[in-house]
Image: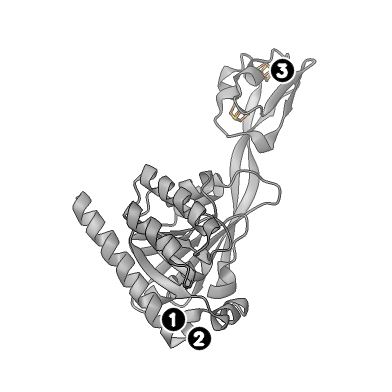
Amino acid sequence: MVISVASGKGGTGKTTVSTNLAWTAARSEPVVFIDCDVEEPDSHFYLKPGWKEESEVKVKVPSVDSGCCDGCGACADFCRFNALAAIKGDVLVFAELCHSCGGCKTVCPGDCIDMVDRKIGIVKSGRNGDISIKQGLLDIGEPMAIPVIDSLKSNIGDGLTIIDCPPGTGCPMIETVTGTDYCVMVTEPSPFGLHDLSLAHEVAEEIGVPHGVVINKSSEYDSLIDEFCLKSDIPVIGRIPFSMEMAVICSRGDLAVEADPVMKTRFEDILKEVKSFAEATNNTQR
Ligand code: SF4
Ligand code: SF4
């Protein structure tokens, strides 16, 4: 079973939920935890893994042999991403824009292009007890998170996997949530939270991933989210109350489930809900 934890925007408590869920699940079974928030991964503050391995994530980009190239411009004309420019008989490569399709190499009449490796980030692996942790980190200035996310998702195994998604509803979030069995959407009871939740809900509907909502900083304003969820037929599977104690626990980098028995019970209930919804949906689809 693969559970993704997403939020329409940053700062809603997505990593708080994903890491506490991972700790809760690991009391009864081994868990693979994948941090796909590759621009700013922070799950390690809570899960505190001992890192064991690190590998580079590379993509293929064109390298033009200037001795061979006659500047015909066919490669630049082909590239839809403006990653190549043919200027005065020379070809400039803007590697950050390249999507590694290899089309420029295919159309070059003189076979003057080689596809070469370019590092864009790293993937680290570590462990804390029964939680195996994978975390990706995109190099500073790199615009494309997808290859790092794909590299991370190749670690999904047969057991329980919990994935911390990138914030927002752009390509990195879609790539991460796609193919998961259930998406936990973390939101907060505010107009901003509601707006971004509605976008995340649309994305999940479009890609066909069952989902439910956890309201973080739950308060007397929950009705804002409850009404939307009722209207959109989305289950609210948990609430984490707004409290100073919770804020202090998180700011120390501690897990709420370890520090507070009430939170432990809440997360056990959320995990039960997630598993029963995911299993019921899978059974219906079979
Ligand atoms: S590999 Fe594709 S995306 Fe990259 S420069 Fe060539 S044509 Fe453009
Ligand atoms: S298609 Fe080949 S020969 Fe033509 S500009 Fe590009 S690299 Fe040079």
Q: Is mark 1 on a helix, strand or loop?
A: helix
Residue named by callout 2: 259
Measured Cα–Cα span from mark 2 to mark 1: 8 Å
Mark with earlier residue (3, 1):
3
Numbered disc in front, either 3 or 2: 2
Looking at the image, tell me whether mark 3 or mark 2 is earlier in sequence order: 3
Please state which of residues 220 and 73 is positioned toward the viewer in this rendering: 220
Q: Mark 3 points at which residue?
A: 69
Measured as percent of width and height from the top left, residue 83 is found at 67, 29
- In depth, the one of 200 and 119 nearer the eye is 200
Given contact means CB atoms under 8 Å apart, are the residues at marks 3 and 2 in contact?
Answer: no
Front tag of 3 and 1: 1
Judge from the rendering whether residue 85 lies leftward or rightward of residue 57; answer left or right: right
Residue 112 image point, x, y percent? 66, 21
> At which x and y percent is residue 139?
67, 51
User: Which residue, given by chain and number where applicable, does mark 1 sit on?
Assistant: 263
Q: State left or right for residue 129 relative to residue 75.
A: left
Q: What element carries label 3?
A: loop
Label 2 with label 1: CB-CB less than 8 Å: yes
Between marks 3 and 2, how big is the CA–CA gap? 64 Å
Q: Where is residue 242 in the image (x, y as percent from the top left)?
A: 52, 76
Describe the element under mark 2 as helix, strand or loop. helix
Is the CB of the residue bearing disc 2 within 8 angstroms of ligand 1? no
Asked if one can make out residue 66 in the rendered structure from this viewpoint, the answer is: yes
Left/right of residue 171 with respect to residue 140 in the rendered view: left
State whether residue 174 is above or below residue 9. above
Q: Residues within 10 Å of mark 3 (few under 14, many from 20)?
A: some
Describe residue 110's horizontal placement relative to residue 49 as left or right: right
Bin the neighbour count of mark 2 within 10 Å (Cα to Cα): few under 14, some 14-19, many 20 and up.
few
Q: Does the residue labelled 3 lie within 8 Å of ligand 2?
A: yes
Q: Quadrant of the N terminus?
A: bottom left
Q: Residue at x 34, y 46 (%)?
A: 208
